[in-house]
Amino acid sequence: MRQSSHHRMRSIRAIGVLFALIGLLAGCSSVAPEDYAGQTPTFVLEEYFDGNVQAWGMFQARNGEVRRRFRVDIEGTVEGDSITLDERFIYADGERQRRVWEIERIDEHTYEGTAGDVIGTATGKRYGNALNWTYTLALDVGDRTWNLQFDDWMVLTDENTLINTAEVTKFGFRVGTVTLFFRRSEAMAAAQ
């Protein structure tokens, strides 16, 4: 009986050490928006989304399977430090959805935003060519609503092309990934 208790204590300590190591490794490998300071071209949200932008994207489950494909038409309106993004989604299965973001530039690097299906306030940090945007989205799944956490990274690759990847989690567990490619309409018209 005494040896069993000792063995359990050693197992608990080993598990504790394992979790501490995982936490340490995760902390060492995380990327911060400041890591992109000085990268070009400089991504300024209110400049990029002032006007019409189109995007194409997909949601992949955690096993890599593509579950949804979609296109988004975005109309951006900028007034001072306020940005309104009227997003109209068209999914491959014909479903349509609309999300309207109200975004405020707080300072040179910080943004905050709200939308009808976003819980609380989204926050973003921008440095160089990248923006890290985090928020909780209320997503209807069947007859239930899931609150999913999004950790978005937007990277401007040239003045008209923006790539966005978002890790989607629930209770800290990865649900899947969203990938989007944005293109400003002026660039599309010039290419034709």
Image: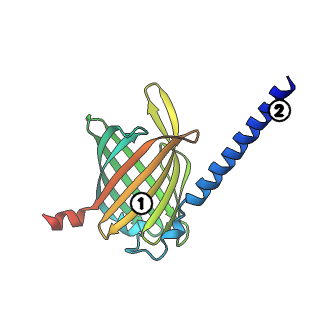
Q: For mark 2, what is the residue?
A: 6
Residue 42: name its quadrant: bottom left
For this view, does 117 lie left or right of residue 185? Answer: right
For this view, does 108 lie left or right of residue 8? Answer: left
Residue 116 coordinates in the image, percent (x, y): 47, 44
Amino acid type at circle 1 is Met
For this view, does 30 lie left or right of residue 155? Answer: right
Q: For mark 1, what is the residue?
A: 154
* Of pointers 1 and 2, the one earlier in the residue sequence: 2
Residue 74 coordinates in the image, percent (x, y): 32, 54
The residue drawn where x is 43% and y is 62% is 83
Q: Nearer the viewer, residue 191 or 13?
A: 13
Question: Which residue lies most toward the left here?
Answer: 192
Above/below status of 144 relative to 174: above
Q: Nearer the viewer, residue 3 or 180?
A: 3
Above/below status of 2 relative to 18: above
Q: Nearer the viewer, residue 74 or 188?
A: 188
